[in-house]
Structure formats: structure tokens, C-alpha cells
Image (tube, rainbow, N blue to C red):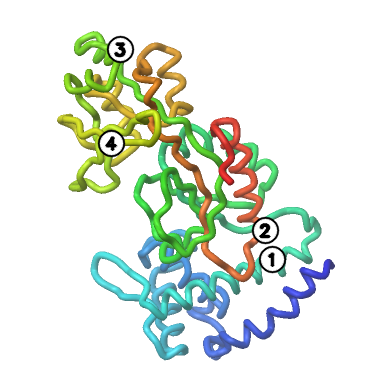
Amino acid sequence: MGIASLQRLLRLPRRINQLRLIAPFKSIDQSMDTMESLRAFLRVAELGSFTRAAEMLGLPKASVSTAVQRLEASLGTQLLHRTTRRVQLTGDGTAFYQRGRDLLDDMDELQGMFQRDRSQLRGRLRVDMSSGIARNFVIPALPVFLALHPLLEVEISGTDRRVDVVREGFDCVLRVGTLEDTNLVARPLGAFRIINCASADYLTRRGTPRCLDDLAQHDLVHYVTTLGQRSPGFEYHDGQTYQLLPMRGPVTVNNGDAYLAAALAGLGIIQAPASPLRPHLDSGALIEVLAAIAPEPMPVTLLYAQRRHLPQRVRAFMDWVAEVMAPHLEAVLR
């Protein structure tokens, strides 16, 4: 056993004592002990549903509900807001969730230390990324990662929505674009080269723009993170800085798949990462335009919550994702 593992082992009893309040009940419906009750609470918090948590755990919904109720009674505080439509963490629930995640991660790692094959990573990974990155890069390569770590389970959320990493229980997220102010730990991976392009059919009908002034005769497919927001317009480089040019366009989308589909349907010009568009560029379905005034490269970053101890399975996944993405990124950001 290494020094670091021994230190973690010695720290565990103190942390378990901090949750001793939840120990008085030994079982719930003769199927769940204290640690499994904690695991059930974490699952409800992550999925936002008692029904879905019960299905994932293979337990009756009543057992999961009882587990959470007894946790709350033992702690003397409400952990979850319950409505007919959704379940959300309270302020105390958020704090308890993070401590509980750390505790279970330590317990899982402690158990793994005494398995016959200590090199095998175990447990569940919950990650989020855009649907385009999941479809084009991560999922096609995932069999290799799972072959290296066959005891891991991976849950991938593919959405363009900015998820709440802590409240929604994600181990890490892969973000494309400028980061907002955040308390998360950031690991820059590089940047996508962004190009201006449109479908061959659109350019045949509307002509190919040769300069910025020509854009007055063209449509832009607008992309926003939330429908109802105002599109920033067409981004370009004027030789010194990046600028924004307001442009007309009848279509606004909030999803990367819809953005690409709109371009392929001939609805206007888009500004998107070149790498995932490569098959469409090679086939001639999409054609790059105005290459001399391309938008600013778009950073790609791994984010994860600040934690006393980052589980080895999370670190291994992030290292692997960095390798998968490296060939598609223009430069490593410093």
C-alpha cells in the first residue's frame, strides 16, 4: 500500500464519524444499509426522480423514498424539495450531496485496494458534453476506453445546455466556448478552428460572398444557447481584432445538430468547428467561404468540481478524453 493510499485510509474513519448520525437504522426493507441509503439519495439527486433512481438501483420506489426520509430525519434537515413534477436539492442537500459523493468515492476506492486486480478501475462515471462531440469523437472511441477499464460504467449526457455540474452530479463536463465565471476546476485541452461555410445549394442560389460587404445579400443561421436570446451576429477578424456584424436570417437554433442540419438544408451561412464538418466539406455538401476573416478559435475545456480527492476513474477518463480530442484541436491553450 502506497503512502497516499494509507493516508486516505487513515482519513476515512473521521469522515465516516461525521455521518454517524445516519447510522442508527441498519436496514431499509431488509435490503439497504446505511451506505446504500446514502447511495440511493445521491442517485435521486442526480436523476431528479425517485422513480428513475429506483429503476437504476433495481429497488422498489418505496424503499428509495424511505431511505431518503430516514436520512433527512437522522440529519434533522430537508435534503430534497419534492413536487409532483421534479425533485431538487435544498441548500443543505447540495452540501450533503458533495460530502456524500466524496465519502462513497473513498469507500469504493478503499474496497478496490483489496481486490485481486488492483489495477482495475471500478464505479460509475457521469459526464456531460455537447451532442456533436459525443457523436463525432467520444462515443466512437469509447469501446477502447471500456476495454481498458471493463468494470467502469459511463453515463454520457449529450446536450448543448450548460448543466450544473455539482447539483446534477456530474464528475466532469467537456465545454466548447468561452467559460463563464465558475468555481469549477478548468483543464484546457485546446481550441477548435472555426470556419464560415454554407451548402453548395445555398451558394448556387445566393452566390458566394467574397468580402464582408457581400454579406448584406446573405442569410446567417443564428445560434443561441437559449431560445429568446439575441444572436450576436457574424464574427470576423478585421486584421487587428475580432468584430461582430449583425446579419439577417430567418432561422435561429439552440442545438448543434440543428445548426448543421440548417446549413445542409441551405438556410444560410454557419460558423462552426471545422473538424466535425470534415465529412461534409470533403463530400462537397458544405463549402468554406470567407476563409480570410474566419472567427476566433473556440476553446475546449474539461471542467470538474473542486474536491478534496478526485477519484482515479475520473482522472483516467479525463486523460483519455484529452488524448481523443488532441488530433482535432488546433492548439493547446496555456
Classify mark 1: helix, strand or loop: helix
Decide: is 146 above or below 287: below
Q: CA distance from mark 2 to mark 3?
A: 47 Å
Classify mark 2: helix, strand or loop: helix
In the displayed structure, does residue 128 sit left or right of residue 19?
A: left
On residue 244, the disc is 4
On residue 200, the disc is 3
The amino acid at mark 3 is: Ala
Return the disc, 2 or 1, that comes first in the chain's sequence.
1
Q: Nearer the viewer, mark 3 or mark 4?
A: 4
Relative to the observer, which residue lies in front, 79 or 68?
A: 79
Q: Nearer the viewer, mark 2 or mark 3?
A: 3
Q: Residue at image x 29%, y 18%?
A: 211
Return the disc, 2 or 4, that comes first in the chain's sequence.
4
Classify mark 3: helix, strand or loop: helix
Decide: is 33 above or below 196: below
Q: Nearer the viewer, mark 2 or mark 4?
A: 4
Return the disc, 3 or 4, that comes first in the chain's sequence.
3
Q: CA distance from mark 1 to mark 3?
A: 54 Å
| Residue annotated with mark 2 | 312
Instruction: Say if mark 2 contacts mark 1, CB within 8 Å.
Output: yes
Q: Is residue 54 visible?
A: no
In the displayed structure, does residue 217 sit left or right of residue 332?
A: left
| Residue annotated with mark 1 | 109
